Image (cartoon, rainbow, N blue to C red):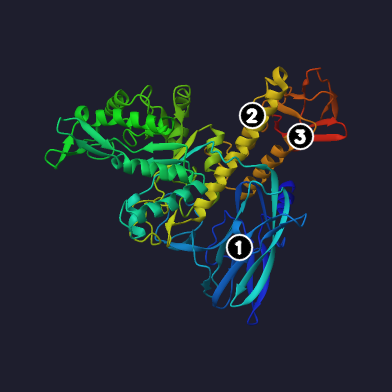
């Protein structure tokens, strides 16, 4: 009941209206953004009568409306007014609000072995691309979802904003209210998680009918780069083939970085600025699992004008030495990382290690990164990127290397099935929303996916036969740049959730430093982890419940704001919230630190506070929910924190 009341307050439930259209009732409702609205969708009976959003400053937040008519409609338009603050002075202008109709992709097949999590059974149409058309025609009895995105400027005034959504069906209008609660805190502009989606330059050029590396191409590429940055991608896969090599008459090599530099600078300028991910130097001979070899370097022979192919010693080695020097000169060396060969496995890890050692010999200051399919990389790889399912299966081994390697994770056409999340078209939106909760939960520093725009001849057509639907791309080509998708928007929501957790951790760390020695026992990561575990208890029981994600995100925001309110103090339990406690007796410790003069009560009982602000006691959880209630009181201010545990008697 507590969860239901909270969600009703937030507005994360269906909303239904009736509108007259030539004497026939049309339907308009608000839908949870994680719900993939199929063509035959119908509204439920719930009616809170408004679209409600919550966001920090400097954050994007989305809503989803659905319109349906029993008769055809030639022209549907949707507009959102400016949002006016409760003080009737401050506002969020229409320039910060986007309205887009959602298009559909036809599926001939489903993701393998995923009956329990898929949202539709093929053949079917599933919603995904966000179209750039300002109006759309509506067939009879077909649901049409609409995606609304609001960006909250970092200088927006906290509080509640109100506006109106106007839906016009062939000129007849229906209006519904929209409210936005803006939190007091600002989402960091800095990214605290590495994110890369590999992309295909040729596909961009072909889709927009421009010559590769022409001025028109660079203009289009910059729009794609800005889209990545707006969705919090901060690492760019950079082809080393952009560097042109030449063999001079004396046999030495020279290198032209003009195209490479322009590429990197385009992305840095757009905001994809935390990682330069240099593409793979080697490959497995004969296909996946074959012996790993380093590529030959192609260079133009100045004397003959022909192209020559050079082995490692005369080609790739001096190339890498020069590349490292160039990156240092440009101030990019600390951002750089380089691939050896993709997905080395137990069958070819020995040859991969040999190739990696040669890369290290030539460029010892460029960190190596690879998506990996086994665990034998000690001393040969700085950034380990295991597949999500393999990280879970081999976690004990991976965790042993945390002190010497940085751990990321990746997903691709695997894992599929009903357990692990992925971003396939026929998976629920929550399967995308949880991706970066996983990063925080397991302290994985980055995320990688191979398919940002590897669409086929028809990006909007039936997905590629040999891969799960949606694996190849998460954006679509528009008239003058990329089109977003529902999945790409939800992935940004997930990255913003990660920043909420990071912000909570960082704020706890700041207060901990303020209190000094008395607060040294406080772990700044414990409380965000407790909240993240509500969504990701472990990798085989990641939630698919949208309501739980919304509730947890709301609680994180509340706790960030509460830390700034008096009385100032920190609290932690040992063991962590959510732990199963066994009678015989229960051993639960409460400890924390508060500012001088603060009264502390645990389950209503006063607790002694030392002069330096530290307090500690034992407690027994109460009630059906196993609650421990801690109160800080000072100068007519009260702050209450509740932690929940499961009690087991046998």
Circle 3 packing at 10 Å, graded few (<14), some (14-19), many (20+), is some
Q: For the residues marked 2 and 1, what is the alpha-carbon distance in whole angstroms? A: 37 Å
Q: Position of residue 390 (x, y in %)?
A: 43, 35
Q: Residue at x 74, y 37 (%)?
A: 562
**Residue 641: assigned label:** 3
Asked if the residue at tag 1 contacts the one at tag 2, i.e. Cβ–Cβ closer than 8 Å, the answer is no
| Residue at image mark 1 | 65
Indicate which disc, 2 or 3, sits on the residue closer to the N terminus: 2
SS at mark 2 in the image: helix
Q: For the residues marked 1 and 3, what is the alpha-carbon distance in whole angstroms? A: 36 Å
Q: Is residue 629 left or right of residue 645?
A: right
Instruction: Tell me: residue 174, above or below residue 297.
Output: below
Among all residues in the image, which is located at the extreme right?
A: 636
Instruction: Tell me: residue 35, above or below residue 28.
Output: above
Which image quadrant for residue 37? bottom right
Circle 2 packing at 10 Å, graded few (<14), some (14-19), many (20+), is some
**Residue 526: assigned label:** 2
**Residue 350: assigned label:** none
Q: Position of residue 295 (x, y in %)?
A: 24, 35
């Amino acid at each position: 009941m507590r969860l239901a009341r909270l969600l009703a307050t937030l507005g994360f439930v269906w909303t239904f209206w009736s509108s007259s259209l030539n004497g026939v009732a049309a339907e308009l409702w608000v839908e949870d953004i994680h719900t993939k609205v199929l063509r035959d969708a119908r509204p439920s009976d719930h009616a809170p009568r408004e679209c409600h959003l919550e966001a920090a400053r400097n954050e994007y937040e989305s809503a989803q409306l659905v319109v349906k008519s029993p008769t055809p409609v030639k022209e549907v338009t949707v507009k959102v007014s400016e949002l006016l603050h409760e003080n009737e002075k401050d506002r969020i202008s229409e320039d910060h609000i986007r309205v887009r109709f959602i298009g559909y992709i036809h599926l001939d097949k489903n993701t393998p072995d995923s009956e329990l999590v898929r949202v539709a059974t093929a053949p079917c149409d599933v919603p995904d691309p966000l179209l750039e058309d300002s109006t759309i025609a509506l067939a009879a009895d077909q649901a049409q979802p609409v995606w609304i995105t609001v960006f909250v400027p970092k200088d927006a005034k906290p509080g509640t904003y109100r506006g109106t959504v106007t839906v016009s069906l062939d000129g007849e209008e229906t209006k519904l209210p929209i409210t936005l609660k803006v939190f007091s805190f600002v989402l960091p502009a800095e990214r605290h998680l590495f994110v890369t989606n590999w992309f295909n330059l040729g596909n961009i050029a072909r889709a927009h009918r421009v010559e590769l590396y022409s001025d028109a191409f660079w203009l289009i590429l910059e729009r794609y780069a800005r889209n990545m940055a707006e969705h919090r991608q901060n690492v760019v896969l950079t082809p080393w083939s952009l560097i042109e090599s030449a063999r001079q008459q004396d046999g030495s090599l020279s290198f032209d970085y003009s195209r490479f530099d322009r590429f990197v600078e385009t992305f840095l300028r757009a905001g994809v600025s935390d990682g330069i991910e240099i593409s793979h130097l080697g490959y497995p001979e004969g296909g996946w699992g074959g012996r790993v070899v380093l590529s030959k370097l192609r260079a133009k022979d100045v004397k003959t004008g022909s192209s020559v192919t050079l082995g490692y010693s005369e080609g790739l080695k001096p190339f890498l030495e020069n590349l490292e020097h160039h990156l240092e000169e440009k101030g990019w060396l600390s951002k750089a990382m380089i691939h050896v060969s993709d997905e080395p496995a137990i069958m070819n890890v020995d040859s991969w290690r040999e190739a990696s050692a040669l890369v290290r010999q030539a460029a010892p200051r460029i960190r190596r990164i690879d998506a990996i399919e086994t665990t034998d990389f000690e001393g040969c790889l700085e950034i380990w990127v295991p597949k999500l399912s393999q990280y879970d299966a081999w976690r004990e081994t991976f965790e042993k290397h945390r002190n010497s390697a940085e751990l990321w994770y990746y997903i691709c056409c695997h894992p599929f099935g009903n357990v692990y999340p992925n971003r396939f078209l026929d998976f629920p939106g929550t399967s995308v929303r949880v991706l970066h909760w996983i990063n925080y939960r397991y302290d994985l520093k980055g995320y990688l996916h191979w398919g940002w725009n590897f669409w086929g001849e028809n990006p909007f057509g039936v997905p590629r036969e040999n891969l799960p639907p949606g694996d190849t791309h998460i954006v679509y080509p528009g008239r003058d740049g990329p089109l977003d998708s529902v999945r790409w928007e939800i992935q940004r929501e997930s990255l913003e959730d990660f920043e909420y957790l990071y912000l909570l951790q960082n704020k706890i760390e700041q207060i901990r430093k303020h209190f000094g020695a008395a607060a040294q026992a406080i772990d700044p990561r414990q409380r965000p982890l407790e909240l993240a575990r509500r969504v990701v208890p472990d990798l085989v029981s990641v939630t698919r419940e949208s309501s739980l994600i919304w509730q947890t995100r709301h609680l994180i925001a509340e706790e960030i704001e509460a830390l700034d309110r008096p009385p100032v103090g920190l609290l932690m339990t040992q063991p962590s919230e959510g732990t199963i406690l066994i009678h015989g007796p229960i051993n639960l410790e409460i400890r924390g630190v508060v500012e001088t003069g603060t009264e502390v009560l645990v389950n209503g009982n006063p607790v002694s506070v030392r002069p330096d602000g530290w307090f500690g006691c034992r407690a027994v959880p109460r009630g059906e929910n196993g609650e421990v209630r801690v109160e800080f009181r000072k100068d007519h201010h009260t702050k209450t924190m509740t932690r929940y545990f499961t009690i087991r008697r046998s």
